[in-house]
C-alpha cells in the first residue's frame, strides 16, 4: 500500500448539450450562449481521484484545466465533488489551442506543480464530449516522458512507485504496471461518480482558484494558443442528412418480419 | 505547401492478435493518398511479426515495409513502441503517418505528434489532398458536427476510422522492398503484466459488417436473448445502448455511442433503442439502419433506413425465424 499520493485530474469545461449549431458566415460552431459544465467523461476521473484519496490517507487531489475564465465552472464542479484545490490555466494567449498546444500547457502546469511538491498520478477522462479526440492524456505523458495508459477500466493497485491498471481494448483486456509519475485515462466502467454534496458546493463556491498565464508557465507566445497549434479547423458543418427511410408495413408482426427480411436480402444487406 | 524534406506516407501496421485487418484498410487510404501526392507508400511492422506479414503488406500496396524487429516491441509498451517509431520517422521523414483509431493506435499517434512536432487528427473518415494541401474530415460534438482540419506542420499524424476504407486487395507477386531496422530498446517505466483475449466466438464490434444492438426497450437481461439469437443467425456482433449497459444487462464492451464505441457497420439493427444523441453518435454512419421499436416517433425510428413499428419481443424472434427459413431454403 502506498503512502499518500498527490493526484491531479485534468478536466475540461464543455457544452452541456451536443445539439450545437454552425454559424453560416464563419462556418464555425456558435459558442455564444452555450451552457457549459464539467465534461461528463471527466466525472469518472474526478471520482477515481477521490476514491484513491479515501483509500490512501495523506493523499491530495487537485484539478487543472486549460480554458477561458468561464472554465472555472468545471473546476468548481470538480471541487464540489470533493477535489481539494484547483488551478485554471487561462489567458487570451491560449485561445485557439489544438490538442498539441493544450497538452503542452497542461504538461507545463504539471511541471510547475511538481516544482512545489511531487505529482504522482495524473488522471484524465476518456475524451472531451466536444472534441472527441481522447489523446490529451498520452500527449501530456509524451511531453513529460511519462508512461501512460488509456481506456483504463480499473486501477488494480497503487504503491509508492507504481500503479497497476487494467485497460479495455478492442479485442480483450490487458494489465500494465506503470512507474510513477504516470498518466491514466479512464473509461466509464471504472466507477460510478458521486454527486456533489451541498457542503462541497458551498466550499467550492468560496474557493479561490489561482490563474496561471503562459508567462507563469514559462511558455512563449509562439508555444500556446493558435500560434502554438499545428492543426487548424478550417470549417465546421452539420453532417449530411441521411436519405429518408421507409416504414416496413404489415398487418401482423409476422408480416412485418417477413417483409423486413425480404428488403434486406433484396438490397443485398444480408 | 509541401516541405520537400517531409514526404511519403507511412502506415503503422499494428496487429491485433495476429490479424493485420486494420492495416489493410489503412493501406487503401494510404495508397490513394500517396498516388494523389505522387509519393511513396511505406508501412512499418513492430515486434516479431510472422514471416509472411511484410510480404502481405507489399502485395496489398506498400512500396516499402520497414520491420522494427525486437521482442520487446511486441509487448504493449507504448513508451518503447513510440520511441521506435519516432526513431524511424525522424530518419525517413514521412509526411503523413497513419494509425488505426484503436486504443493503441490513438495513444501511439498522440505520443508521435508531440515527439515529431506533428499535427494530429483522430478518427478521420475522409482525406482530401488538393492543391491547397491536405484537408481531412472528422466528427466532433458526438457526431453532430463535421470538422474540416488542416495541418500547419511539415508532417502530420492521423488515426483513421475503421470500416471507412475497404481492405486493400492482394496482388500476388507485387514488387516492394522489405527492410529490417535495428532497434536498441532502452528501459521504460511500462511493464506488461498480463492480457486476456475476448470471449471465444464473440465478434468484435469495431470490425463487424453486421451489428444487432439492444436497448432499454428489451426490458431485462433476458431480453437480450433474442438479440443474441438474431446476431448468431446473421453472424453479427452484439451491440447495446448506454441504458442497457448501465442497467447491467450486458457488459460495457458492447456499448455503442459516445461513451462506448463508434462503429460504421453495413447494417445496424437497433432493437428497442430510442436513439439518444450520444447513441446516434456511435452508429449513425452505418450504411443501413433498421429500427424495431414500439414508439414510431422516437429518434432512432426517424433515423432508420427501415423502421419497423411494433413489439420488439414479438418481432425479433420472427425476424430470426425468417432468416433461418431463407438460409435453409438457400441450402436446400
Image (cartoon, rainbow, N blue to C red):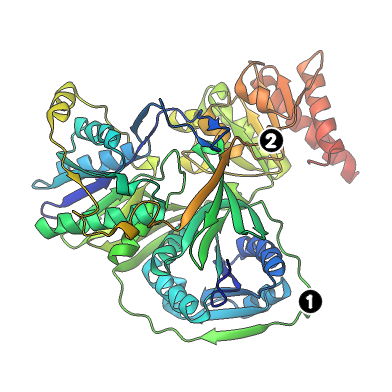
| Left or right of B312, for residue B257 | left
Q: Nearer the viewer, residue A135 or A51?
A: A135
| Left or right placement of residue B88 versus residue A92 in this view | right
Query: Contact, CB < 8 Å: mark 2 with mark 1?
Result: no
Query: Nearer the N terminus, badge 2 or badge 1?
Result: 1
Q: Nearer the viewer, residue A206 or A198?
A: A206
User: Residue B215: percent from the left, percent from the top?
Assistant: 55, 28
* Spot occupied by residue B174 in the image (x, y as percentages of width and height): 76, 79
Can you identify the residue that label 2 sits on?
B230
Residue under label 1: B172
Of badges 2 and 1, nearer the viewer stands 1
In the depicted structure, whether residue A68 falls above or below residue B194: above
Can you say which quadrant of the picture contains the N terminus of chain A? Answer: bottom left
**Quarter of the image where one finds residue A49:** top left
Element type where label 1 sits in the image = loop
Q: Nearer the viewer, residue B263 or A254?
A: B263
Pointer 1 indicates a residue of which chain? B
* Camera sees residue B257: no
Q: Up-down: is B329 above or below B123?
A: above
Distance of mark 2 from mark 1, alpha carbons? 38 Å
Badge 2, how many Cα within 10 Å: few under 14, some, many 20+?
many
Residue at figure coordinates x 36%, y 45% from the top left? A95
Which quarter of the rendering shows the C terminus of chain A? top right
Q: Nearer the viewer, residue A221 or B165?
A: A221
> Would you call the spot at circle 1 few (<14 residues within 10 Å), some (14-19), or many (20 or more)?
few
In this rendering, the answer to whether A90 lies above or below B96 is above
Residue B154: percent from left, percent from top: 51, 68
Amino acid at each position: 500500500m502506498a503512502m499518500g499520493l498527490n493526484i491531479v485530474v485534468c478536466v475540461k469545461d464543455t457544452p452541456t448539450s451536443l445539439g450545437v449549431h454552425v454559424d453560416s458566415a464563419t462556418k464555425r460552431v456558435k459558442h455564444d450562449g452555450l451552457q457549459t459544465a464539467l465534461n461528463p467523461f471527466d466525472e469518472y476521473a474526478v471520482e477515481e481521484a477521490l476514491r484513491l484519496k479515501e483509500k490512501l490517507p495523506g493523499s491530495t487531489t487537485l484539478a487543472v484545466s486549460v480554458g477561458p475564465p468561464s472554465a472555472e465552472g468545471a473546476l468548481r464542479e470538480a471541487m464540489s465533488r470533493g477535489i481539494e484545490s484547483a488551478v485554471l490555466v487561462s489567458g487570451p494567449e491560449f485561445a485557439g489551442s489544438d490538442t498539441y498546444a493544450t497538452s503542452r500547457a497542461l504538461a507545463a502546469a504539471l511541471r510547475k506543480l511538481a516544482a512545489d511538491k511531487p505529482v504522482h498520478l495524473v488522471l484524465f477522462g476518456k475524451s472531451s464530449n466536444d472534441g472527441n479526440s481522447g489523446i490529451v492524456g498520452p500527449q501530456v505523458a509524451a511531453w513529460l516522458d511519462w508512461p501512460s495508459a488509456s481506456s483504463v477500466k480499473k486501477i488494480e493497485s497503487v504503491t509508492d512507485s507504481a500503479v497497476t491498471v487494467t485497460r479495455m481494448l478492442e479485442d480483450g483486456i490487458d494489465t500494465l504496471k506503470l512507474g510513477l509519475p504516470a498518466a491514466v485515462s479512464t473509461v466509464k466502467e471504472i466507477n460510478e461518480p458521486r454527486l456533489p454534496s451541498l457542503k462541497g458546493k458551498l466550499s467550492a463556491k468560496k474557493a479561490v482558484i489561482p490563474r496561471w498565464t503562459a508567462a507563469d508557465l514559462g511558455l512563449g507566445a509562439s508555444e500556446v494558443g493558435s500560434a502554438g497549434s499545428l492543426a487548424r479547423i478550417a470549417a465546421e458543418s452539420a453532417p449530411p442528412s441521411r436519405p429518408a427511410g421507409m416504414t416496413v408495413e404489415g398487418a401482423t408482426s409476422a408480416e412485418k418480419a417477413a417483409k423486413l427480411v425480404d428488403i434486406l436480402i433484396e438490397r443485398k444487406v444480408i | 505547401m509541401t516541405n520537400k524534406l517531409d514526404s511519403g506516407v507511412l502506415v503503422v501496421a499494428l496487429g491485433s492478435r495476429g490479424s493485420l485487418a486494420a492495416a489493410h484498410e489503412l493501406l487503401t487510404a494510404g495508397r490513394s493518398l500517396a498516388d494523389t501526392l505522387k509519393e511513396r507508400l511505406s508501412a512499418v511492422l513492430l515486434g516479431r511479426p510472422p514471416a509472411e506479414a511484410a510480404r502481405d503488406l507489399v502485395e496489398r500496396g506498400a512500396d516499402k515495409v520497414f520491420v522494427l524487429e525486437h521482442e520487446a516491441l511486441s509487448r504493449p509498451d507504448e513508451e518503447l513502441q513510440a520511441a521506435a517509431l519516432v526513431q524511424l520517422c525522424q530518419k525517413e521523414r514521412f509526411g503523413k503517418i497513419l494509425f488505426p483509431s484503436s486504443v493503441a493506435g490513438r495513444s501511439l499517434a498522440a505520443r508521435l505528434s508531440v515527439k515529431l512536432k506533428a499535427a494530429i487528427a483522430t478518427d478521420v473518415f475522409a482525406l482530401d489532398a488538393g492543391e491547397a494541401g491536405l484537408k481531412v474530415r472528422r466528427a466532433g460534438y458526438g457526431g453532430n458536427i463535421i470538422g474540416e482540419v488542416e495541418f500547419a506542420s511539415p508532417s502530420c499524424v492521423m488515426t483513421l476510422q475503421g470500416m471507412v476504407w475497404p481492405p486493400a486487395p492482394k496482388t500476388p507477386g507485387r514488387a516492394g522492398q522489405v527492410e529490417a531496422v535495428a532497434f536498441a530498446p532502452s528501459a521504460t517505466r511500462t511493464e506488461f503484466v498480463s492480457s486476456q483475449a475476448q470471449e471465444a466466438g464473440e465478434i468484435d464490434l469495431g470490425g463487424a459488417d453486421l451489428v444487432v444492438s439492444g436497448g432499454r426497450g428489451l426490458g431485462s437481461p433476458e431480453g437480450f436473448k433474442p438479440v443474441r439469437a438474431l446476431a448468431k443467425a446473421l453472424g453479427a456482433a452484439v451491440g447495446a445502448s448506454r441504458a442497457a449497459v448501465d442497467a447491467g444487462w450486458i457488459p460495457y464492451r458492447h456499448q455503442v455511442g459516445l461513451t462506448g464505441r463508434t462503429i460504421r457497420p453495413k447494417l445496424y439493427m437497433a432493437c428497442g433503442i430510442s436513439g439518444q444523441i450520444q447513441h446516434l453518435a456511435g452508429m449513425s454512419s452505418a450504411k443501413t439502419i433498421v429500427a424495431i421499436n414500439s414508439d414510431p416517433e422516437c429518434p432512432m425510428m426517424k433515423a432508420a433506413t427501415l423502421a419497423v413499428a411494433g413489439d420488439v419481443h414479438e418481432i425479433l424472434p420472427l425476424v430470426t425465424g425468417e432468416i433461418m427459413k431463407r438460409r435453409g431454403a438457400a441450402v436446400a
